[in-house]
Amino acid sequence: MTEKDFSQGAAWMKGEIMPIGEAAIPVTDWGLTHSDITYDVVHVWDGRFFRMADYLERFERSMEKVRLSVEQDREDMRRILHQMVGQSGLQRAYVSLVASRGQPSVPGSRDPRLCENYFYAWCVPFVWVFLEEVLPRGAHLKIADSASRISPNSVDPTAKNYHWGDFTQGLFEAKEAGFDNTLLLDSDGHVTEGPGFNVLMIKDGKVSTPRQGVLEGITRKVAMEICAHHGLEVAVDDIPVEQFLEADEVFATTTGGGPVAISRINDRVFSNDAPGEITRQINETYWQWHNDPAMSEVVDVNY
Amino acid sequence: MTEKDFSQGAAWMKGEIMPIGEAAIPVTDWGLTHSDITYDVVHVWDGRFFRMADYLERFERSMEKVRLSVEQDREDMRRILHQMVGQSGLQRAYVSLVASRGQPSVPGSRDPRLCENYFYAWCVPFVWVFLEEVLPRGAHLKIADSASRISPNSVDPTAKNYHWGDFTQGLFEAKEAGFDNTLLLDSDGHVTEGPGFNVLMIKDGKVSTPRQGVLEGITRKVAMEICAHHGLEVAVDDIPVEQFLEADEVFATTTGGGPVAISRINDRVFSNDAPGEITRQINETYWQWHNDPAMSEVVDVNY
C-alpha cells in the first residue's frame, strides 16, 4: 500500500477514500450540467464534529425537496464522514456531503426520473468564509446592485444548492469596490443572504433575521439558541434593507467561521466600526459550545 | 498506443483527447460548487458542423458576461472541436464547449478574481431534446406550476448556464403528468423557455418569440432567418401566456433537434394535434440548410 497525501483533504467516492486531488465527477453528470445537486457542510474543530445531527437532518430534507435519493442513510453518512476525516488527519476541517442526480440510464434522455443519484463526500482544511484577518475589525459588505437573490419561486434556497450565479456577480462587484463580501436583496428590497452565510441584525437588544429567500442555516440556528440562552428575543421576519441598515449591530453566521461581526455595509458603519458587544458574546459562546459533548463528537477513524 | 473506445463520445481536457467516460472535473472546482461556468453546444450532422461561427461567437460573449477568460481563442476552439469530433468518429454529435471558473490560487479564498479559468470540450452521440418518436405527433408541454424561470435580474439567461433548478422542478412536474417537457413563465406570467429550447408562436402568419428571460438561441436565430427567407414577419416581444395559447402554431427550437412542432400545451391543442404546416416548412428548410457550405463545415480531424 502506497502512502497517500491527505494534507490538502480527502474524499469518499463510491466506497473509496482518496486524496482530494483525485476526486472528480464526470463532465456529463447532471450534478454539473444541470446543477442538479444538493449539498451540506459540517465542520470539524479541534478534532470534533459540531452539531453533526443537525447537518445530516438538513441534508436529508434538502435531498427530499429536490427529489434526490441515495443509497446511504444518515448513519452510513455519519460513518463515512468519521472515517474520511479521520483518515485525512485534519483537526480543523470543512466537510462537504453531496448528493448528485447522476446520469440517465437511457443515453440522451432528459427525464430526471431515469437517473441514478449518488452520494459523495469530501473534506479540506477549515475554510474561513471571512478571512481570519477580517475578524478583529468586522466584515465589510457591499449590497449587490448587479444581482438580486434568485427567487424562492424559481429555486428553493432551503435546499442547499450550487446556484451561485447571483452571488458570483455580487462578489465581483464587492471585491472590485474593496469590500470583503456581498449581500443580496430580493426583488422587493428585503435583505436575504450572502454566499455561504446568513445575516442577523440587533436593534435595541432584539435580534432579527430574514424569513425567506434564504438557507435555514445551522450556524444561524445555533446563534438563535445562543441568543435565547442569553435571554435575547429573536424574530425571523421580512427585513427591508432600510430597516437592516438602522441596526445597532449586524453579524453573519456561517459554518465557515461561526458568528462573524459585520462592521460596514456600503457606507453605513455599525457599532463604532468594530465587532459589537452582543455579537462578541454570541461568538464567544459559539466557540465554547464546541466542547460540549451534547453538541459535538470526536472524529473517530474506526467509527 | 492502446486502442481507445470513443463510441460513447470524446472529450478534450488540458490538451488531451480522451474517451468521454474519462473526462471529469474536480469536486472542488467552482464550475461545480458555484455553478460558476458557462457553456455552449454546437451540433454535427452527417459529418458537418452547423453554423459553428455563430456558436463560437455566442460562447465568447457568454464568457465575457460572466467574466471568464480562458487561454484558447476562437480559432483554437475551432481546431479543438474538429480534432476531438474527428477522433471520436461520430457523424452526428452533440458537442459541448465549456469554460469553468476553476479554483482559487489561494486555498480557501472566496475571491473569483483569484481563480484560474479553463476551457474544455466534449462530444457525445447527437441528443434529441425531444425524442425522435415525439416528432411526428408534436411535443406536449406542461406549463410549470412549481417554478417560475430564474429572473434575468438574478442570473443572465443570455450567458448560457447550468442553473437548471427551475427547469428540473418543471421537468418532474411535466413528466409525472405525462407530458414530454416543461415550459416556464416569468414572475409576470410571460412565456420564457424550456430546458434547452426556445419557443415561437405563429398567429395569422406572424411569428413571435419571447424577448427576455431567455437564451438567445442560435437555432431560434436560424429559424427567424428561415421565416424571413419565406417572407414571414418575426417579432421578438414579451408574450403573456394567454396570448401564447391563442397561437395557430407553436414550435420549439433547440440545437438538439432543430425546430420541433408543439402540438399540446396543458389542455390546449394546436394545429389539429399535429405539427403545423408553417412549422413543417421551417423544419424542412432548417435541415436543407445543413448542406449549405456557407453554413456548415466538414469535420476534419487534421484541421
Image (spheres, coloured by chain):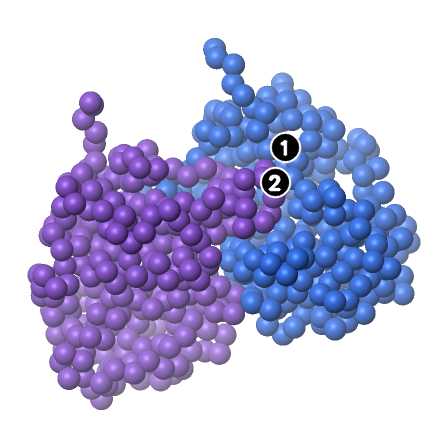
Chain colours: A purple, B blue
State whether residue B122 is above or below residue A117.
above
Does residue A110 appear to the left or right of A132 in the view shown?
right
Residue A181 figure quarter: bottom left
Q: Nearer the viewer, residue A142 or A30?
A: A30
Q: Which residue is mark 1?
A: B125
Which type of secondary structure does the marked residue at label 1 adopt? strand
- Residue that lies at the very extreme toward the top in this rendered image: B1
Mark 2 to mark 1 CA distance (whole Å): 8 Å
Which type of secondary structure does the marked residue at label 2 adopt? loop
Question: Is residue A182 in view?
Answer: no
Q: Which residue is mark 2?
A: A108
The mark found on residue B197 in the picture is none
Q: Estimate the x, y position of residue B48 in percent, counting from the top left.
A: 72, 29
Question: Is residue B127 in view?
Answer: yes
Depth-wise, is mark 2 or mark 1 nearer the camera?
Answer: 2
- Residue that lies at the very extreme toward the bottom in this rendered image: A204
- Please give the chain letter of the residue carrying mark 2: A
Does residue B3 appear to the left or right of A99 in the view shown?
right
Say which quadrant the C terminus of chain B sits in.
top right
State whether residue A69 is above or below residue B7.
below
Mark 2 in CB contact with mark 1 (< 8 angstroms): yes
